[in-house]
Amino acid sequence: MTEARARTIELVAFVAILVAAAVLRFVDLPTRGTWDADQGHDMLVLRDFVQRGVIPLLGPPTSIGDFHHGMLYYLLLAPAAAVSGVDPTAVTAWIALGGVVAVGVTGWLARSIGGPVAGVVAATLMAVSASAVEESTFIWNPNVIALSSSIALAAAWHAWQARRARWWIVAGAAAVVTMHCHVLGVTLTPVVAALLVADVRRRRAAGDRAGARAVLVSAGWWIVLLLLSYVPLAIHEWTSDASELRAAIAFLTGGGGPAAIPLPARVPIVGLRILGWPLAGLITSAPIETILASTLVVVVTVWRGWLVPRSDERTAVRWLALGLVWTVVALAVGAPSLATVVLGLPNDHYHAFADPIVFVLVGAGIASLVGVARASMSSDDRLSTVPASVRVAGFGLGAVVLLGLVGWNVTRQPPVVAPDGGWPAAQVAAARVLVAARGEPFALDSLPAVKPADALRFPVERLAPAAIVPAPASLGSGSHVDEAARVVLCDQLFHETIGSDCGGPAEDAYASSIFGQPVPPTFVVLRFEAAPGRWITVYRPTPAR
């Protein structure tokens, strides 16, 4: 086969993979993504940003701790929000497009490490990965870090391999984006920085002082970009008595959250989640498959990183493998909550910055199995022909592993309609609330109080911008009656925190605490389950007219 024909076949394969990735992510996109408080909050911030000129100084709130992620997340989504009139489907489509681009970048990285077959395999695995598809189909800050991380890793490797120092600026900028989009993304920075340090040392050892200085200059620009990206945070800290810093210190000095599981047990659990999630999904849903997938990653990593002669591929595999080891240990220590899976909430997206590493390593391993069908390197580094039986076995094993992973993920794609109905269901719920309120302003509350009611607030304000008013101190008592209706959004997932069940008991107890007396039945004008376990109750202090 001529080189030109081989390149044409490779190009066609990559185009087909990207088309498949787009189909899996864009089909039925409006209904596939979950819609809850996080999505409502992000859309409210984007609305205020692009329509009212309110620049966000902070990113989304963290799930543990009282501090926030970085604000670059909102800058990334702002173009889609601006051109669409702050339409959640358009913003989700923007994230989905990023997921498709991440497939291409990850394939490019794998190709530069293990050759064309490695690139095609890694891109294929990421394109069909049920986990990667899920990450691309709803609005959430961790869902964009697979793209930024793949760019950071690919740019870093290109800077090393091609000896082009300016690519370190690209790698650094992408690492900064990863750090902003999720605080745990800071874990990626040492992985990229380690290869930069190795590049400086390599150039100095070769007597290339000018090249070493160029890399250091690029590192300096990386630091400049990092500092500039946190100027909004600095402004916030200056005007809020350093509330973010104090919250972060309190979180870290408190052990990084609850740590019921001892560290020695957390490490393997976190390791299985990081290695298995991109290939097999959530560990609690597929424990055996997760173990098998994780074992595959370890085996191919050891093989290609430590049992083959020195080469660029071995260097890259060792770099990425050590990056995974660092990630597992760092997250096991710094994010002990990852040792526990919370059913009903998004899981494992927190460490999506490691997903491209897993796909690349497996792609390189499968490509090497296929490569055995042609030749291998002997102990004296000379190309030697492999027996036919070994060639057939290597090709067959690689094909079985690839088809098994593809088949597993294709049959476990996210449902076409999210369990909570997604954004369309939220719009319907908002319309029902507005009808029950009879066009009059109402106050909006949430149970538990620590979870904002933004899942309902955004669709309501999108339909009727002035519908929601600040919550009054009481609904009314004695001779005085507050005429404003009150809407309570209750999430059954947190019933233990609330103290009673949603769907009546929790909401009525909350309303009674405001009234100072039991809630008359006539006060409840509407109660319905907007999504599984998510109840909405509309109270009016006077009988509906």
Image (cartoon, helix red, strand yellow):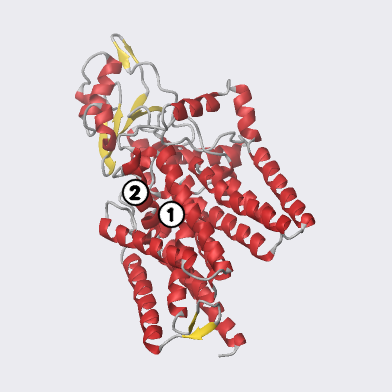
Residue located farthest toward the top when viewing the structure as drawn: 479
Location of the C terminus by quadrant is: top left
In the picture shown, does residue 278 fall above or below 366? above
Disc 2: CA contacts within 10 A as few (<14), some (14-19) or many (>=20): some
- Disc 1 residue type? Glu
Identified at 64% across, 49% down, the residue is 173
In the picture shown, does residue 501 fall above or below 480? below
Q: Which residue is mark 1?
A: 135
Indicate which disc residue 399 carries. none
Residue located farthest toward the front when viewing the structure as drawn: 380
Mark 2 element type: helix
Q: How many marks?
A: 2
In the picture shown, does residue 119 fall above or below 522? below
Question: Residue 249's spot in the image, x, y percent?
Answer: 50, 27
CA gap between label 2 and label 1 equals 24 Å
In the picture shown, does residue 29 fall above or below 58? below
> Which residue occupies the foreground of this view, 535 or 293?
293
> Which residue occupies the foreground of this view, 5 or 455?
5
Q: Residue 251 is drawn in which quadrant? A: top left
Identified at 60% across, 32% down, the residue is 233
Disc 1: CA contacts within 10 A as few (<14), some (14-19) or many (>=20): many
Q: Earlier in the sequence, mark 2 or mark 1?
A: 1
> Which residue occupies the foreground of this view, 496 or 178?
178
Q: Which residue is mark 2?
A: 268
Question: Residue 422's spot in the image, x, y percent?
Answer: 37, 49
Question: Residue 194's spot in the image, x, y percent?
Answer: 59, 50
Question: Residue 401's spot in the image, x, y percent?
Answer: 35, 72
Determine whether, in the image, residue 345 is placed left or right of residue 179: left
Residue located farthest toward the right when viewing the structure as drawn: 210
Mark 1 element type: helix
